Image: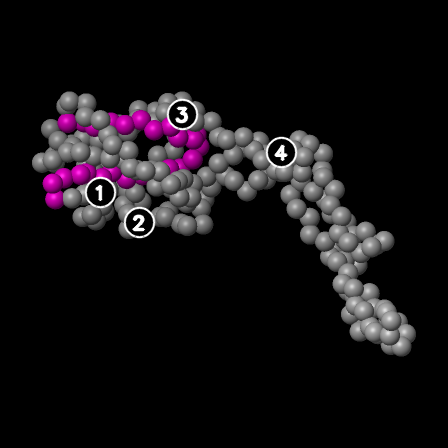
Amino acid sequence: TTDLDCEDDNAYTADSCVDGSCSYASLECLSDADCSASTCNTVACDLSDNTCVETVVADDTVCDDGDGFTENDVCTSGTCAGSTLPTVNVTFNLDMSTQNEASPSLRIYYGCVANCDGDYNSSVDIWQNMSWTAMTDNGDGIWSTTVELSTGVDYSYKYSNSTTNGYAYEGDDGVFGDCADGSDSELRHVTPGDSDMNLDTVCWSSCTSCPV
């Protein structure tokens, strides 16, 4: 038996005869096209042993880390990473004077950095994994809380109210105005700018202030 007798017509194997038996060694690549480059690395096929060899690109090469919540992404030692977006303090104000009981909380649901128009879209709206935050009574029927949020991100959020009968949520009774996105959750939206924000006071389940 010779090497020719072991030919399997597969270009990606090295065929040989060893001690009377055929041996087939897999080849990783035959050309650069067989190799997949990763972010911050170039890749080429080394024809001396038919393996893909990665080469780290120069530090500070611009890249995309795939995280919309970072900016100024660059390569460092073969890894792409960006710096976190700057943050500002956003104060939310909710008028509960129309409610018999008041113990409201705020929850940030999703954050979106591009193509954010319309209702909730799982491909662009990223779950923020934030807990409900209890709001503080200002003594005049208005409750407030301040949250640190990233600039330029479209955040969706919602208010809840704890009562003796359980929790009530905005949107339980349907659409309450254009400030809600019309999704099943009836989420409000805010996009922080470059400085701290103190949002206009709104009435529970309303886009405007409470009637006087």
| Three-letter amino acid code at the position of disc 3 | Val
Place residue 63 in its image quadrant: top right
173 drawn magenta:
no
Q: Is residue 116 visible?
A: no
Q: Main secondary structure of the magenta part?
A: strand
Q: Quadrant of the N terminus?
A: bottom right
Q: Is residue 191 above or below residue 4?
A: above
Q: Mark 1 and mark 4: span between their CA atoms?
A: 42 Å
- Tag nearer the camera, 2 or 4: 4
Secondary element at image label 1: loop
Secondary element at image label 2: loop
Instruction: Name, please, the residue furthest toward the front.
Output: 19
What's drawn in magenta, residue-wise?
A: 141-165
At a point 74% along the width and 55% down the height, the residue shown is 33
Question: According to the image, label 4 marks what residue?
Answer: 74
At a point 43% along the width and 31% down the height, the residue shown is 150
